[in-house]
Amino acid sequence: MSTLALWIPLLPLFSAAALAAVSLSGRVKAKALAPALAVLPTAAAAVLTFVVLFGHGTGAATESRIRYAATGGPELWLGARVDGLAALIAVLVGIVATAVQLYSVTYMAHEERYTSYSALISLFTTAMLVVVYSTDLLVLLVGWEVMGACSYFLIGHHWERPEARSASIKAFLVTKFGDVPFLLGILFLAHGAGTFRIQPIVQHAIQQGGHGYTAAGAILLIGGVMGKSAQAPLQTWLPDAMAGPTPISALIHAATMVAAGVYVVARLYPVFLVTPAALWILAISAALTAVTAALSAFAQRDLKRILAYSTVSQLALMVAGLAAGGRDAAVFHLMSHGGFKALLFLGAGVIIHKAGTGDVDELNAHSLRKKLPVTFITMTIGLAALAGAPPFSGFFSKESIAGAAYDTATRGETANSVLHTPPSGIGWLVFSATILTGLLTAAYCFRTWWMLFWPMERGLIRSTEEETGAEALEALVAESTGNAMGAGLAAQPPKTTSARPEAPTAELGPLVVLAALTTVFGFAGLDHGWFPTWLGDADGAPYRTAAADAGKLLQPADAYGLAPGLISTILALLALALGAGLVASSLRTKPGHDPNRVLGILRRPALAGFHADEAQDALAVKPTQLAATAVGFLDAEVVDGYVRGSGVATRALGEGLRRLQNGNVQLYLTGVLTGVVIIAAALGFGR
């Protein structure tokens, strides 16, 4: 199966190359082929990922590789490594990429740059598949960086809009800031293990423990994880990335770029598991990100920004699960989240196209429940899954993270496994953050669903103006919508939707499929052995229940179980009920007011993302600008001054000598005589 996996990324790569050629040709007839060139190769790649998944089954990891370069040190290998983790995530990438390409056929039909847009999506898909299947960390890094470049172009697709340009640059720079330590981490791991191949690096970590180069590499890799998966303090780029087309948001948020950071930690999990310092860093960053991003999602008014902050929060839950020893739970939630988050973004695209706005207060006046029945049902399923409501996939996957954290917190250290378990303190931190995030997620999901589909009393904006002042509100709306027209939304009357059909089949079809998957996928966690058996152990070895019970796998037996636990399930359901109840109570006591008023003094800072942009500006941007100014001054006034001064001095000296060399013999003799007298006097006084 690893040989077949070598060819899968070539299909979307062929699609990208063919679409680029069509775009450059400029021929109208050729552009008519663009939808087929975009969808069919990507769909074929998705089908082949299923072939690889079922062909691999529950076996051990396999590799197909060729040596790319003999360096005299660690060699570079081109190849594919297929284990349960790679096979499952590749399926997620293939499904979501195909859904996005199909959805874009009609959603982006009016775009003149549709061909180049779809070519970049195909290249994006290729890069993520390279990350998933790669057997060598440097080849993985190539796919990692290609994704960064594609995100720059896709977020800035509408480059004529200033906010799109700035968002694309911001995404590129912030993620590259994290990629510097990521590259160093790869070099440290390769130096310690003597190779860039993933399997020997993992085995070296298991045998040697978290010391020296392994520990340094694990900690440095976290920089890239924080950048790609938008974790504090590098989370600020993702909400602004909403300036790109909505299908791109679905692709980035569900199955490619932001999933890559979580995937790399899961892929190299033994490296992190033997490094407690790395686990603590991941846990603290994830707990902080999960709660603050959920608060920010609750405060937003733009639909896409609500979903963006929710992605940041849900990614933090995955990272937290990894930190708490719940690798299987984190991967389970990664796959579950990929399905329902793609569903939510694609549904948001239908709504925004229909209503012409993404402001949830304006959308509240459109009677979307009646005019968009399919979108209403599928978005309801997606929001219920995001909130963690049973029986949808989000309930099972999020509860599995809470359960894994609770097991770690109450189990403590154990010798019944090859590797040590994370400290119990991490378990308590992650468990508390997961329950609190669940409460906030339920609240903002219920608020979003109600404001989208159940008309409220008008006067929301007037009431908010009375509380904050008209000028402050205008700034808040502009910030929330994230576009140049945002400041004028409050003054515009609600638009009315047209009598057009709800949406083309190419857009509604992916919604229905993703909604169906979201409804049934969670039940995979009920079978104690199904998901762990297909996922395998963290080193690529096959999972066997008997081996886990005997302590022969990398983690204790309960780390592989995804079935809901009693205490974690009760607390998760209580958090769900309390979050939804807070919003319902707010709607009942003050109809027509935005339920996010329950945030109180936290609403304004949450709306501003807790001023993370300002903090980055103060801690990184301004010091860099000051340092650049100082370097410029030193270069212009000191270095250049020295060069200019030496030239002036040389010229002045030459001018003086030139005046002495005037051809007057008497002057020459006088000078010689004066010199003799001075020398004689000096010698006389010296005695």
Image: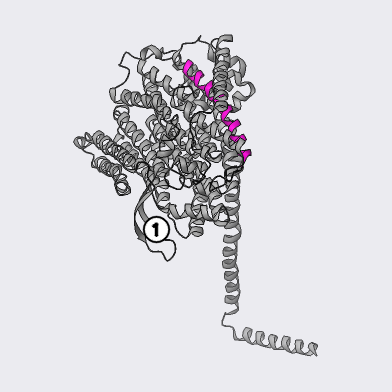
Q: Give the vertical position of 453 relative to 116 (above or below).
A: above
Which residue is tagged 1?
Answer: 76
- Res 392 → quadrant: top left
State the scheme by which the image is colored: one colour
- 425 within the magenta span: yes
State the predominant SS element of the stretch in magenta.
Answer: helix
Q: Quadrant of residue 249?
A: top left
Q: Please give left or right for residue 33 compared with residue 560 in the image.
A: left
Q: Is residue 162 in view?
A: no
Task: Confirm whether residue 148 shows in the render.
Answer: yes
Q: Closer to the camera, 617 or 315?
A: 315
Q: Where does residue 373 sit, x and y in percent of width and height? A: 36, 15
Placement of 553 over or under 361, stated as above or below: below
The quadrant holding residue 14 is top left
Instruction: Pick whichever, 491 or 578, lies toward us.
Output: 578
Give the percent coordinates (x, y) of residue 410: 61, 35
Q: Amino acid at mark 1?
A: Leu
Residue span colored magenta: 422-450
Q: Is residue 433 magenta?
A: yes
Q: State the residue at coordinates (41%, 39%).
A: 533
Q: Residues within 10 Å of mark 1 (few under 14, many from 20)?
A: many
Q: Position of residue 496 (x, y in %)?
A: 39, 13
Rendered position, 550 above or below 36? below
**The furthest residue to the left:** 29
